Image (cartoon, helix red, strand yellow):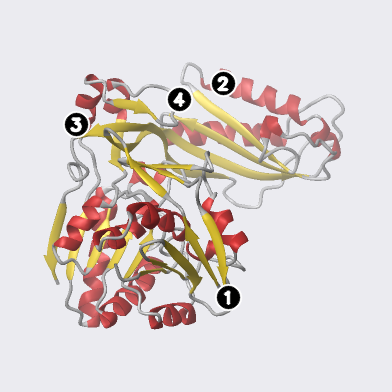
Amino acid sequence: MPPITVLTPTGTLGYGFGEEALARGMSLNPAVIAVDAGSTDPGPHYLGSGKPLVSDVSIKRELTALIRAGRAAGIPVIVGSVGGAGSGVQVDRTAALVREIASENGLRLRLATIRSDIPIERAKQAVAANEVLDFEAGYPLTQGALDETVTLVAQMGHEPICEALDAGADVIIAGRACDDSVIAAYPIWKGADPALAIHMGKILECGAFSAEPFAMDVMLGTVDEDGFVLEPGSIRRRASVKSVSAHSLYERENPFRQGGPGHEIDLTGCSFEQLGDRQVRVTGARLTETEDYYVKLEGARLAGYRSIAIAGIRCPTTIAALDGILDQLEERARDYFAPDPISVQFHVYGRDGVMKELEREHSPAREIGLVIEVTAASQELAHAACHQISGAMLHHHYEGIINPSGNLAFPYSPSDLDVGPVYEFSAYHLMKVASPTELFPVTLEDL
């Protein structure tokens, strides 16, 4: 098998890459441009709402550069998990941008879209057949949870993308997909060892985060019969054994096992070798196919509506008495709006806003940033309760008080901000499927 080079322009489409790095990367004659565009890291909002993680402005700008580069070189461009969550509405939105790009730049291309939305009834059938396993949710998936789910997707492997390549696609806009599968698909399609291609994809999926200095920037991987070589696009960066091996362990619970749809990769025999100053060669990954093929489900349901208030506290007596003040304000707000339920959370930045109860350092704070967060069944109720709490705290009396008012300093007017609908994950499970392409239809369009 001749070596196959994959160019990954950035860790997340829309997060940027250098023009010089892309130009140099293209000069190395990659066979494909492949990039991830989504994650569950930002939470379930983008899955539930259908809104894009990154603005259309940024996505169109970067897609234009990539598609023009791909067409000039005669190589395909593959984007996975478009829109952030890879839902159908996000696939449609990104495909519309591709049509605009083709029209505005006079490009002729074959566009493939791959949807990853799972019909609720299909998931219910799997639950009834005991073909759904817990992944990281910590609870079983139920029919009731599926009834509340507004959007349900599954992570595709490389197989649907290979199907689109079989159909002659020049640009592939894929719904939710495993990050490494997006990058591994083309090499596997061309005959590369899936273990090597997927391991390479795992390291490349964050772009030049596996380089020194790390950045959202271009990274290339070249896979051959025995291993793969990694190199950053920018001459100002280098791949090192440390940077590459470290990223091989990134976001991994088990350093020696990498699971994915239909497979598990054994990394116990991997080795990393420095080639010159800027390249690293990786060998040793081994793949085992699983007996059954499972895909990861991701579902979101509406949890309510949120309003927040952001304020600063500088008064030392208020800071010293803050826990008691917040407890009293929350209790009064719940009583005030009863029987309507409200969820109240306080985030005390400068003390334990990030770590909460896990914080071990409790040094006295000179000033506090307080975020008051209220979630309720309607936006009107959430806003009313948030303002009731922030307003009451301005003049709240407590033991040892010196200032009768002005306990909060608001950076914004209005002080209470409506955030909108709040979503939570309703499904984070594995579902057995009949085939790798069963749930991921490919649609072709000539532009």
Quarter occupied by residue 243: bottom right
Residue visible at 69% across and 28% down? 326
Reading the image, the residue beneath label 1 is 276
> Badge 4 is on which residue?
138
First of labels 4, 3 by sequence position: 3
Name the side, left or right, on which 130 lies relative to 253. Answer: left
Quarter of the N terminus within the rendering: bottom left
Amino acid type shown at disc 2: Arg
Nearer the camera: disc 1 or disc 4: 1
Residue 414 image position (x, y, % from top left): 57, 48
Q: Are marks 4 and 2 in contact (CB under 8 Å)?
A: no
For residue 80, say whether it is visible. Answer: no
Query: Image height check: is 80 above or below 316?
Result: below
Residue 84 spot, x, y in % from top left: 38, 52
Q: Residue 261's spot in the image, x, y percent?
A: 32, 42
Mark 3 or mark 1, whichever is nearer to me: 1
Q: Earlier in the sequence, mark 3 or mark 1?
A: 3
User: Crowding near pointer 2: few (<14 within 10 Å), some, many (20+)?
Assistant: some
Query: Which is more toward the observer, 103 or 446?
Result: 446
Q: Earlier in the sequence, mark 4 or mark 2?
A: 4
User: Where is 428 relative to 190, above or below?
Assistant: above
Write down the residue under mark 2: 334
Label 4 amino acid?
A: Gly
- SS class, disc 1: loop
Q: Amino acid at mark 1?
A: Gly
Q: Amino acid at mark 3?
A: Arg
Neighbourhood count class around disc 1 (C-alpha, 10 Å): few under 14, some 14–19, many 20 upward: few
351 shown above or below 216:
above
Disc marking residue 122 = 3
Residue 51 is situated, as x and y percent measured from the top left of the image, at 35, 51
